[in-house]
Image (spheres, rainbow, N blue to C red):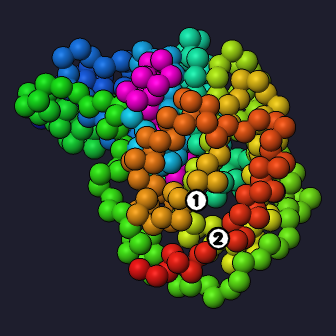
Amino acid sequence: MTSDPNWKKWFKNMLTVLVTVLIIQALIVIIIDPWFHFHAPTKGIAYILNNERCQNDGIMKHFDYDSIITGTSMCENFRASDADRLFGGNFVKVTFGGGYFKEIADAERTALTENPDLKMVIRSIDQNFAMEDKDYRNPDAPDPSYLYDNNIFNDCEYIFNREVIYTWVPRVLEKTIKEGKPDDFDDYMRFAEDRPLGAEHVMKDLDHPGQSPQSGKGLSDQEEQMLKDSIEQNFIANVKAHPDVDFYYFFPPFSGAYWYVYHVAPGEITKHIEMMKMIASMLTEYDNVHLFAFFEETDIVMDNDNYSDLIHYSGDISDRILEWMAEDFHRLMKEDVEDYFTNIEELYLGLDYDALYNY
């Protein structure tokens, strides 16, 4: 019995078609490269910027820049053009919404390693994420590790990614044809104009704890060691390894309602203050660290109209933070740290938090 030659021919033709289609798909993804995994933006293509964890690694490795804005959503509303103007650099924005210290430190390290001309880093120190293990990562955040590991053998996860092929590539091509202009780092991940502000949003579903302000206990020995290990690994390691780079770090000004609900009312403010004081004391040991805190700006933190929720401030406040840092205003020096946080604890124990609930 002999095999059917028509069947063999059909199978060969189908295999050829399949391989050809896969090659064409791969070439399209590699040439357009919407997540910048293989190369810098191709001239003439209008790229879309709105997927930070998939695009940031490629931005840091392939774009032309000498300064970066990184950190969490506390930095997403910064405009790169404002940073260019205020600090005199060529900024890109590579933020990680909900990113803990480890994830952002790794990204910071990538930029420092990939770009020997890097001269400045602007980064938030989110105090609500500080009391975690040094290697802790947000389990709810996307983790496209195949884009970050420099392993060419798993690039197929990007090259043949259904979302990339059927969503990202068509959208980029459509934008190129219709608009001809790529997104920029002013709008990348910016949400300020999309979130309404005010007490009805900040205080939504927020019951009054009904407790008088109290200080409470400080950090335990175990908590101090955990915090020390995290700051050394996720901040100081990069600072020490790159003494010619200026690191502009800042504590974001969370709302007064956040302070009251999470720290003042439950008697956790002393621990919170000691935590920030420890971070500040460690970082201000280094001349290339410029550390800022804005907690004394009570006109900001006690005004719900500046916030869309307990921690996210308006675009105007983001603009002001950049301006203050450029002016060296609200900078903490080594000799100021102790008195500054002692005064902040006393200040926040005496604020009129009841007024936040009267709207």
- Which corner quadrant of the image does residue 117 belong to? top right
Q: Is residue 359 visible?
A: yes
Residue drawn at (76%, 64%) of the image: 346
Mark earlier in primary sequence (1, 2) = 1
- Which corner quadrant of the image does residue 33 belong to? top left
The three-letter amino acid code for the residue at tag 2 is Leu
**Label number found at residue 351:** 2
SS category of the residue bearing label 1: helix
Q: Position of residue 51 (x, y in %)?
A: 36, 41
User: Which residue is most to the bottom?
Assistant: 210
Q: Quarter of the image containing the N terminus?
A: top left
Looking at the picture, does residue 97 appear above or below residue 172? below
Q: Position of residue 152 (x, y in %)?
A: 48, 24
Using residue 221 as the reference point, say whether residue 84 is left or right of it. left
Magenta residue span: 81-101
- Which corner quadrant of the image does residue 327 belong to? top right
Q: Position of residue 177 (x, y in %)?
A: 8, 27
Residue drawn at (72%, 39%) of the image: 332
**Label number found at residue 298:** 1
